Amino acid sequence: MKNVEFYIVGGYVRDMIMGVTPKDKDFVVVGADRQYMLDNGYTQVGADFPVFISKDGDEYALARKDRSTGDGYNDFEFDVEGVSLEDDLVRRDLTINSCAMDVETGELFDHFGGRQDIHDKVFRPVSDAFEEDPVRVLRVARLRARFGAEWSYSDSLVSMVARMVKHGKLDSLQKDRVWKEMSRALMEPYPRLFFDTLLELDALHVVFPEIYKLLTALE
């Protein structure tokens, strides 16, 4: 197969730009298909999802386009045929997580202004696809618990979360997903900001109604 390209994406690249020691690497593969990955020693994760594990234990996902087919976390359809790096990155949650680095050359790709938003300390959705996954609201809150109160939200993020609340998107959050994000946030440097962020985005009363009552009673 020709023109198969490997990129490091997401939090690893974000942390590198921020000057923070990166942790786990996530890879995107452009120009490959399932058979190429299997022929080159990768093991597929699950029967249908285009994610593979290398012999070193790293995770490689085929570049894909996907779209929501419902309110559930797994209610998505995807396509890997002829998908470019930019096609894949536009589906990511925040611009700060949408940068990529070529594995071979180290060249950085920033199609959506992620480096500027890292510099400005702004959480900004890459596209309207943010609204299709309610867990992304919790991730914003968790990242702010990690980075600190000086981080702000773009107007587009505030508007999107408001629409998600209005249309009941957050009502579909599964308890295990909420617990996972909250438990990770509680281990961050500023755990209170997880709840403060949800309050400021007018989502706390939906996700944690009892905590909302407690915090508003203390004001």
Image (cartoon, rainbow, N blue to C red):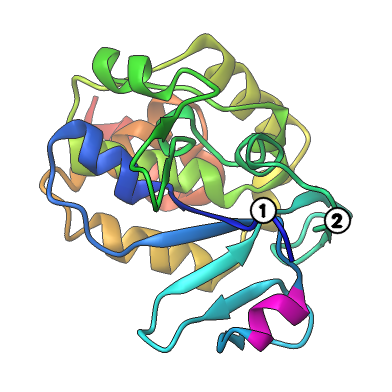
Q: Which mark is residue 155?
A: none
When the figure is inspected, residue 145 is found, relative to residue 6, above or below; the finding is above
For the N terminus, which image quadrant? bottom right
| Quarter of the rendering containing residue 23 | bottom left
Is 171 magenta? The answer is no
Residue at numbered disc 1: 3
Give the alpha-carbon distance from disc 2 to disc 1, as whole Å: 14 Å
**Is residue 193 something that shows in the picture?**
no
Q: Residue at x 81, y 62 (%)?
A: 75
The main secondary structure of the magenta stretch is: helix
Image coordinates for residue 53, horizontal then vertical, percent? 51, 82
Closest to the observer: 218 or 79?
79
Q: Nearer the viewer, mark 2 or mark 1?
A: 1
Looking at the rendering, the stretch of residues picked out in magenta corresponds to 34-39
Is residue 104 found left or right of 34 in the rendered image?
A: left
Residue at numbered disc 2: 81
User: Element type at marker 1?
Assistant: loop
When the figure is inspected, residue 202 is found, relative to residue 48, above or below; the finding is above
